[in-house]
Image (spheres, rainbow, N blue to C red):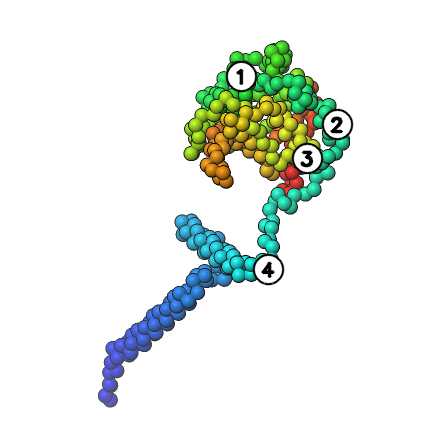
């Protein structure tokens, strides 16, 4: 009986050919898909990311950051295009254009406060005529400020005090030398000082301010942050002159804010010298008080330029105490309770 041998190489070759054909078809399909996706991206550049794309799914940190920046840039472009489109529509309509929509902010959605001050209220006028600052606003006293520091101040705190003294007229800088504040207050009253300002520091940085009105109070304690000295401010003007500055108090609307505004106003003389063209601004926004010191320059009849002189800092009210400084037995009018008062973001105290 004859036995015929079947060659196995032909079967293996046919299998290899089938596999290679499948691989080629897969490569062609992927190339067609990539070409179609590239054509769709070129046709509509705003949809470079799929609808269900989430940046947080990317595991690589650097790539995740790059994709986030690209997504942010695309959203910015879409916003600018929409803005240009609305502007063209308003120009085309002319006088018939609808009024602009007011954007929603935390400030204009503020929760109504019952203690908001009405300037024409008789009770408020009576309180202003009989409070601790009535002698100043009636022109009976002139402000005289003592600026001191905590024990062993360092260079940045010392420079901050010196620059504050150049901003506030009739201000004098003295160092504590270990004296308690209760012993300093009678000496200040005997020398006709109307204010005592204490700058505290932590880690060589100013972090607190105690402002005590003399001789009868009140005393306010502030947290100090974002301190910028004159050398750290870009495009600042020349050194401030000795002219009395103008004072701007902005957005102090409640009874507490009204008393804090009067506390700041009594730091400066009531007769500003307009020749110096210097302005000290206390701007309250979301219970943060921003201080800026500027000089304005008239460029022509219509344009006015502003130069920042410095220093700049931000204050946050911690407490308001009746009378002069007394940490043990003092009576507090208002104390910041963060977990209770900061629960609602749209409710402000000042």
Q: Which of the two discs, 4 and 1, labels the residue nearer the N terminus?
A: 4
Q: Which of the two discs, 4 and 2, labels the residue nearer the N terminus?
A: 4
Mark 3 residue crowding within 10 angstroms, few (<14) / some (14–19) / many (20+): some
The numbered dot on residue 172 is 1
Residue at label 3? 254
Which residue is farthest bottom?
Answer: 1
Q: Position of residue 135 (x, y in %)?
A: 68, 20
Quarter occupied by residue 137: top right
Q: Would you say the residues marked 1 and 2 are in contact, meaning their CB atoms lie under 8 Å apart? A: no
Q: Which of the two discs, 1 and 2, labels the residue nearer the N terminus?
A: 2
Mark 1 residue crowding within 10 angstroms, few (<14) / some (14–19) / many (20+): some
Of marks 3 and 2, the one in the foreground: 2
Residue at label 4? 96
Q: Would you say the residues marked 3 and 2 are in contact, meaning their CB atoms lie under 8 Å apart? A: no
The numbered dot on residue 142 is none
Q: CA distance from mark 1 to mark 2?
A: 33 Å
Q: Which of the two discs, 3 and 1, labels the residue nearer the N terminus?
A: 1
Residue 303 or 21: which is nearer the viewer? 303
Residue at label 2? 126
Q: Which of the two discs, 3 and 4, labels the residue nearer the N terminus?
A: 4
Q: Position of residue 108 (x, y in %)?
A: 63, 45
Q: Residue at x 45, y 25 (%)?
A: 239
Q: Residue at x 25, y 77 (%)?
A: 9
Q: Which of the two discs, 3 and 2, labels the residue nearer the N terminus?
A: 2
Q: CA distance from mark 3 to mark 1?
A: 32 Å
Of marks 4 and 2, the one in the foreground: 4
Of marks 3 and 4, the one in the foreground: 4
Mark 4 residue crowding within 10 angstroms, few (<14) / some (14–19) / many (20+): few
């Amino acid at each position: 009986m004859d036995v015929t041998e079947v060659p196995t190489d032909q079967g293996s070759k046919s299998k290899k050919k089938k596999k290679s054909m499948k691989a080629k078809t897969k490569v062609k399909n992927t190339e067609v898909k990539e070409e179609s996706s590239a054509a769709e991206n070129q046709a509509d550049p705003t949809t470079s990311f799929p609808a269900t794309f989430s940046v947080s799914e990317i595991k690589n940190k650097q790539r995740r950051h790059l994709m986030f920046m690209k997504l942010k840039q695309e959203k910015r472009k879409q916003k600018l295009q929409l803005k240009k489109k609305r502007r063209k529509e308003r120009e085309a309509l002319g006088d018939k254009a609808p009024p602009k929509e007011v954007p929603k902010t935390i400030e204009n959605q503020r929760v109504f406060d019952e203690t908001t001050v009405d300037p024409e209220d008789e009770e408020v006028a009576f309180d202003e005529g009989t409070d601790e600052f009535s002698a100043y606003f009636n022109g009976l006293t002139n402000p005289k400020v003592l600026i001191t520091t905590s024990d062993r101040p360092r260079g940045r705190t010392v420079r901050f005090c010196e620059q504050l003294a150049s901003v506030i007229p009739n201000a004098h800088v003295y160092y504590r030398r270990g004296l308690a504040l209760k012993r300093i207050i009678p000496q200040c009253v005997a020398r006709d000082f109307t204010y005592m300002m204490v700058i505290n520091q932590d880690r060589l940085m100013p972090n607190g301010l105690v402002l005590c009105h003399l001789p009868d109070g009140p005393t306010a304690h502030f947290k100090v942050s974002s301190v910028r000295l004159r050398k750290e401010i870009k495009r600042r003007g020349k050194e401030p002159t000795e002219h009395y500055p103008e004072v701007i108090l902005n957005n102090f609307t409640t009874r507490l804010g009204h008393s804090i505004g009067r506390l700041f106003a009594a730091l400066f003389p009531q007769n500003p010298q307009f020749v110096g063209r210097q302005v000290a601004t206390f701007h309250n926004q979301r219970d943060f008080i921003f201080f800026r010191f500027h000089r304005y320059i008239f460029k022509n009849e219509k344009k006015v330029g502003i130069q920042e002189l410095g220093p700049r800092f931000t204050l946050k009210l911690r407490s308001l105490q009746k009378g002069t400084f007394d940490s043990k037995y003092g009576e507090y009018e208002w104390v910041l309770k963060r977990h209770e008062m900061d629960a609602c973001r749209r409710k402000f105290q000042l």
